[in-house]
């Protein structure tokens, strides 16, 4: 399937925050959306999810204009993995996952045994079957992110939109989430995610887009888009992109970007003075 | 399956509280200044159902049928209605600190009643006016929210608007009290505001049934969706729910319940706040079980408190006072006892 955004304009009330956004994504592709804080990544996300009305442009699914009014149809097409949130009530993890299927259920009866079984299978697929009877408020941030991914998968969507899936996670959990992104893409899911780390795009994405403060939006293959110049323009810092051979059998060269910090010289005496002061 | 084991306590709680409700129904029938035995109750019920002659005195019959049964039914319905409305609002607003009068329903109803009393309207009109102004207050809060929020942060603004409307109507109540005749009207208004079931008749209960069913049926049917709504508008929408429509249904239903309850018995606090808490501790936050269990436990709770209100002293204690006196320390106890995270 193909997801295409064409000349999207979006924002709050009468103010356009995002302009001229166009991109296309096929099943199995992963698009990483990069850009500095406040550039409108979340606004764009919310508009593509139908939370905010589009100010202009159109979203096409397989060439057909998509109508956001039909929430049910949207749920079967686009899954949403929100940023890590503070859950309101201590639901059981399995109940949270099974909620994802709510649009397909009979509106009056709750989930059936089969739906619970499906939720358990999804947790198993994500390697977190042990969470199923835990309390959602008591699991760690990384585990919670997995639960949210499981909940979105319960919708059986064709595309997945992940809003900073790695934010607030420790190093290991970030990589575990990215691993799942790769796995889902390999199974044919089209994924759009936002991230603050260009490295994440190198790790698991096929496409990248960079948004800048001057409302330019550039999209293309990861290598094409994530360049030293582009990052410098977007974030205002110096960045070097390096290819590293890690001498691992299964892994080819790893591309990574390295920010260059200004060297600040402080004499030992000076630092001591500061500390005592 | 793991979830099966987890679901069982919830079902047990619902069964046990149903039994308690029936048990207290009969206990409450016997309680009171006028002695009624279980045998009397059985005979009266038997004769009513099978239309046979009744060998129990007229007095006992009328105590059971005209006084106690309406009062007990009202206590169960009102307790259940307030607890269910509270559980719904708490789920909808993602906040366990919210009670059913958050949108101004109680203050509005109080004003409606106070005004009707001041105008010397008959009792039925006092109730009707209370119900109407309860709905009006919530409608006003929703209107303010719509004007202010324009679709953004709607829930937070709705709560704020509810507080504004509530405070506004509270001051109007005070104004009514200020201008009321201190010999006759003032005590009547004050007494109404304290809340109580002593004046409830069977026609009150029957009248209350209409808004009650209009409110409780949608909440019971759509209770599972509340789970997703508790994760917020955006997430619920992404899961495929028509959140605007659902939110309206929940608010209208819960408001109908609250306004109907307040109209019949005056302002009774705490039930809508603590019963959902207590129930959540027993059955967990899954609204599939939380809503029916809240209803049952709320009904049992208010029935027990009302029994205390009418039997503890020779003079009846206003119900609103007693629920707060029992409710406050009970809430502290619940907070101390709560399991980690199971707020």
Image (tube, rainbow, N blue to C red):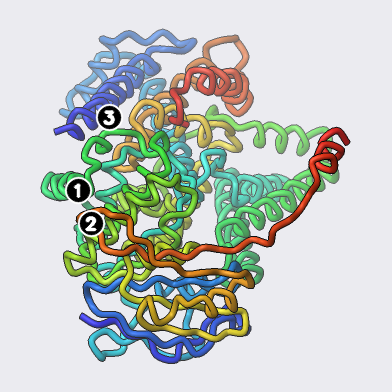
- Image quarter in which the C terminus of chain A is found: top right
Instruction: Tell me which numbered mark, 2 or 1, is placed earlier along the sequence.
Output: 1
Q: Is residue A32 above or below residue B125?
A: below
Of the pair B255 and B60, the residue shown nearer to us? B255
Foreground: disc 2 or disc 3: 2
Q: Residues within 10 Å of mark 3 (few under 14, many from 20)?
A: many
| Rendered location of residue B166, percent (x, y) | 68, 50
Residue name at image x 37 percent, y 21 percent: B64
Q: Chain of mark 2?
A: A
Identify the residue position indicated by label 1 in the image: A119
Residue A154, image x, y percentages: 23, 56
The image shows residue A265 at horizontal and vertical percentages of 76, 53
Q: On screen, A212 above or below A200?
A: below
Residue A114 horizontal/vertical position (percent): 11, 48
Q: CA distance from mark 2 to mark 1?
A: 7 Å
Q: Identify the residue under disc 2.
A: A154
Subunit of mark 1? Answer: A
- What residue is shown with label 3? B10
Q: Rounded to the nearest whole Å, what is the CA distance between mark 2 and mark 3?
A: 25 Å
Q: Judging from the image, what secondary structure is the residue with disc 3 in?
A: helix
* Camera sees residue B244: no
Separation of disc 1 and disc 3 at Cα? 21 Å
Q: Is residue B326 visible?
A: yes
Q: Are marks 2 and 1 on the same chain?
A: yes
Asked if disc 2 and disc 1 are in contact, CB closer than 8 Å, the reply is yes
Residue under the point 22% across and 44% down: A127
Secondary element at tag 2: helix
């Amino acid at each position: 399937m193909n997801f295409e955004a064409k000349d999207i304009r979006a924002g709050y009330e009468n103010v356009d925050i995002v302009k001229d956004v166009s991109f296309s994504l096929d099943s199995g592709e992963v698009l990483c959306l990069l850009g500095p804080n406040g550039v409108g990544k979340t606004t764009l996300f919310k508009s593509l999810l139908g939370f905010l009305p589009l100010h202009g442009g159109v979203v096409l699914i397989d060439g057909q204009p998509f109508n956001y009014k039909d929430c049910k149809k949207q749920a079967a097409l686009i899954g949403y993995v929100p940023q890590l949130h503070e859950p309101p009530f201590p639901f059981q993890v399995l109940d949270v996952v099974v909620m994802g299927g709510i649009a397909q259920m009979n509106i009056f009866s709750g989930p059936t045994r089969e739906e619970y079984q499906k939720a358990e299978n999804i947790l198993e697929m994500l390697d977190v079957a042990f969470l199923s009877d835990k309390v959602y408020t008591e699991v760690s941030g990384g585990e919670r992110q997995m639960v949210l991914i499981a909940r979105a998968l319960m919708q059986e969507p064709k595309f997945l939109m992940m809003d900073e899936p790695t934010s607030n996670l420790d190093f290991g959990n970030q990589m575990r989430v990215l691993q799942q992104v790769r796995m889902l893409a390999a199974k044919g899911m089209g994924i759009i995610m936002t991230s603050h780390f260009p490295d994440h795009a190198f790790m698991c994405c096929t496409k990248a887009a960079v948004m800048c403060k001057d409302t330019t939006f550039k999209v293309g293959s990861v290598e094409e888009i994530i360049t030293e110049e582009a990052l410098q323009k977007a974030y205002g810092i110096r960045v070097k992109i390096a290819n590293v051979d890690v001498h691992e059998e299964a892994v080819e060269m790893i591309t990574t970007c390295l920010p260059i910090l200004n060297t600040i010289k402080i004499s030992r005496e000076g630092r001591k003075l500061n500390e005592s002061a | 399956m793991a979830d099966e084991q987890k679901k069982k306590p919830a079902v047990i709680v619902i069964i046990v509280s149903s039994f308690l409700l029936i048990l207290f129904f009969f206990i409450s029938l016997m309680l009171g200044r006028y002695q009624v035995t279980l045998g009397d109750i059985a005979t009266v019920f038997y004769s009513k159902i099978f239309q046979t002659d009744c060998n129990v005195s007229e007095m006992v019959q009328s105590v059971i049928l005209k006084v106690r049964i309406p009062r007990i039914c009202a206590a169960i319905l009102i307790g259940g209605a307030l607890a269910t409305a509270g559980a719904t609002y708490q789920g909808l607003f993602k906040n366990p600190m919210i009670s059913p009068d958050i949108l101004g329903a109680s203050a509005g109803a109080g004003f409606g009643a106070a005004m009707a009393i001041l105008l010397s309207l008959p009792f039925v009109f006092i109730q009707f006016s209370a119900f109407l102004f309860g709905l009006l207050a919530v409608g006003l809060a929703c209107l303010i929210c719509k004007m202010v929020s324009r679709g953004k942060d709607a829930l937070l603004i709705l709560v704020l608007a509810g507080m504004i409307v509530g405070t506004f109507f509270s001051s109007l109540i005070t104004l009514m009290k200020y201008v009321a005749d201190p010999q006759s009207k003032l005590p009547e208004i004050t007494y109404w505001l304290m809340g109580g079931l002593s004046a409830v008749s069977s026609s009150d209960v029957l009248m209350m049934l209409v808004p009650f069913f209009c409110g409780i049926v949608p909440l019971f049917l759509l209770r599972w969706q509340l789970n997703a709504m508790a994760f917020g508008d955006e997430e619920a929408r992404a899961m495929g729910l028509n959140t605007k429509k659902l939110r309206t249904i929940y608010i209208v239903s819960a408001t109908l319940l609250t306004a109907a309850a307040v109209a019949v018995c005056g302002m009774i606090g705490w039930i809508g706040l603590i019963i959902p808490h207590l129930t959540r501790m027993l059955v967990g936050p899954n609204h599939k079980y939380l809503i029916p269990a809240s209803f049952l436990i709320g009904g049992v709770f208010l029935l027990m408190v009302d029994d205390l209100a009418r039997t503890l002293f020779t003079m009846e204690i206003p119900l609103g006072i007693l629920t707060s006196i029992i409710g406050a320390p009970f809430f502290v106890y619940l907070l101390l006892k709560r399991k980690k995270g199971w707020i």
